[in-house]
Image (spheres, rainbow, N blue to C red):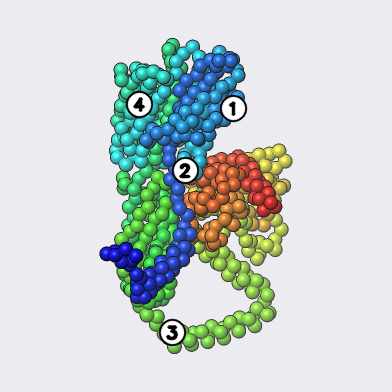
Amino acid sequence: MRRGHPRPTLGRRHACWLLWGGLVAAASVVAAAPSAQAAPVVRVKARTDVKMMQVVIGDSGGILVRGELLDQVTKEPLPSQVVEVSANGYRRRVRTDRDGQFAVHFDIDADGYDIDATFVATEHLAASTARMSDVTVEKQNLVLDLVVEDPALTGNTIDVTVRARAAGGGAVEVPIELYVGDGDELSYLAELRTDARGGAARSIERRSLGSLGRKRLVARFTGDVRYNPAETYTELLLSTSTRLTLALASTAIAYEDTLDGEGVLADENEVGVAGATVSLLRAGRPLVSALTDGEGRFRMRVPGAELGPGTVSVQAAYEPLQSWYRDSRSGVVAVTVAEPRPVPIAHTLAAFGATAMAMLAFLGLRTRPWQGWLARMRRSEDAQSKDDATKTHLTVSAPIRGGVKISRTGLVAGLRRPHVYSFTGMVRDAVTARPVVSEVSVDCAGERLAQSCTGSGGFEFKDLAAGVWQVLVQRDGYVSERFAVPVPHRGEYTDTRVDLVPVRERIFSMYRELAEPLLPDPEKWGIWTPRQIFEHVRRRSPASALSELTDFVEENYFSQRTPLESILTEAEAHIERARSERLAVMAS
C-alpha cells in the first residue's frame, strides 16, 4: 500500500445511509410508475420539407428525378429516410443519402411529366409532399423556400419570406403567388416577386387567413418559358387563447340545497365559444359538466350533498378538444356548506300518512286496474324526461344512438280505431339535444312529399293518404334515419322526436371497439378526451392498419370540414382492416 494516500473506508453509518437512500429512490420510482401511465404523452413531430431539385434525361433514356429532404425549420438534411416518388402514375421508393438527397430513374418518355414526391410520417418526423405539373426536360427547375416567422400565429400579423433559386444554380427573379386554406381547398392571398437575390417578403394580417384551425400556406410559381412550375408549402395553426369566468348565486348553502353557478367562455377577441364543454372542479375532480350556448354562456347546478359539509373550493375548467383553442380556468371560489339538518317530526308523520294513503290507493287499484296502468305510464314518462335532461348536461361514456321516439297515446285514444292522418314532430341532435334544420321526406305508393324543418327543428305533414309511408330524415354531417309510419294511426306519430347522430360521433363510436382494449383502464373512455385516446392508441399500437384508422378517425373528428355520411363506408373499410390485422396478430 502506498503511503500518504490511505484507501478510504466505508463506515457502518455511511453504509446504512446509502442503503436507506437506495430504498427511498426505488420506492419513488415504483410510486411514480402508475402516474406516468395516467395519461398519454403527446409526441411532437419535427416538420419536414421534401423538394424536387431537377428533372433531366437519364443516361439510358427516360428521366432522372433528383430531390432532397430537409428539416423545415433548421433546413438540415434528413438522411436514411424513405421518399416515394411518382411520375405520370409510375411509383418508385428511394432512400435519402447522408446529405438528405435522393435520385430515382423512370423509364418513360413523354412531352410533359406530373411528378409527386411524398415523405410518409415516422415516429419523430411529420409527413410532407411536393408536386410539379407539366414538367419538361427542356426547361430548368426552380426550388422554392417558404419561411414563416411565427407558425403559431400569436400576433396580429405574420411575416412571410419566399426564396427562389434555380436547381444547381443561383437566385432567380420570378413572380410568386401565395394561397391559404384548409387542406386542399385554397384561396388566393397575395402575389410577391423575388428580387435579384431571389428573396421576397410580405407581412400578412392574421384575419385574412380565415377561421381558426390548421392552415396550409402555399407558395406557387406557375412556370414560364425558362422555368418549370414549382410549389412549396408550410403548415400554420391559427389559434386563440380563452377566458373563463364563474359566478355563483351564493357562496353559503344548506346541505340540502343546490349550488347554482353560471359563467362565460370567450376567446381573445371576447367572442363567446359555442358548444364547448365546461366542467366544475373540486380538488381537481370534475363534479358536473355543461355545454356553452351560442354566446358562450353556461349554467351549472350541484347538490350540496355532493360537495359535503364544510368549506370547499370550486373552479370552472375548459379543456378544448380542438388544438386551436387553448385551455383556461376560472378563479377559485370558496363555498361553505352547512351541516345536514335532522329530519323534522312533521316529515316523519307525513311519511306515515303517505304510507297509509299508499295502502288505500293499492286497495283502489285492485278494483280499478286501468288507473294503476295510467299511473305507471306517467311515472315512466317523468323518469324518461329526467333521463333526457341529464344526458343533455352531463358527459357520458355510453355510445350515442339516434332513432325515432313515438308519442304515447292516452287511454281513450288507445281504445279507438286509427283515426289520425297526419305526421308531425321535431328533429334534434342526439348529442346536444339542439334542433336540427334537416330535410324530411315521406314516400308512399309513388307519392313523395318533402319539406325542410323550421328553425326549431319542427315538421308537419297533414292529410296523408292511407298506407305505410317510408320516412327519410337527412342533413349533411349527420347519419340519416329511415323508418315507416302507418297512416292512419292512433296519435303515436304526432309530436314525434327524431334524433340524428353526427357522422363524426358515429365514426368515433365505431372506433371504440378496437381502441378501448388498448386503454390502461376501460373507464378511461369516459374520462379521457378523444385527443388523449388517439395519442395513447398511436403510442401503444405499432400496427399499421390501426395506426391508419386512428389517423383517419382523428382527422374526421377534429376537422373543420363537416364529414358527410358517405365517409362511413370508408370508415368501415378501415375498421375491417384493423380488425383483421388484430386477429392475425392474436393468432400468431
**If you read the primary sequence from the N terminus, does the residue marked by circle 4 or circle 3 appear first?**
4
**C-alpha distance separating marks 3 and 1:** 80 Å
Kindly identify the residue that appears in the image at 39 percent across and 40 percent down. 237
- Local SS, label 1: strand
Mark 2 sits on what residue? 124
> Distance of mark 3 from mark 2, alpha carbons?
63 Å
Q: Quadrant of the N terminus?
A: bottom left
Which badge, 3 or 2, comes first in the chain's sequence? 2
Image location (x, y in percent) of residue 522:
56, 61
Residue tagged by mark 4? 162
Q: Label 3: state its secondary structure.
A: loop
In this view, the residue in front, 78 or 339, is 78
Q: Is residue 406 visible?
A: yes
- Which disc, if any, is residue 238? none
Amino acid identity at mark 2? His
Query: Residue 416: x percent and y percent?
Result: 70, 61
Viewer-closest of 333 and 384: 333
Mark 1 surroundings: few (<14), some (14-19) or many (≥20) residues within 10 A? some
Picture residue at 65% right of the left edge, 83% below the top:
363
Residue shown at 52%/36% (left/top)?
120
- Amino acid under label 3? Val
Location of mark 1 (residue): 91
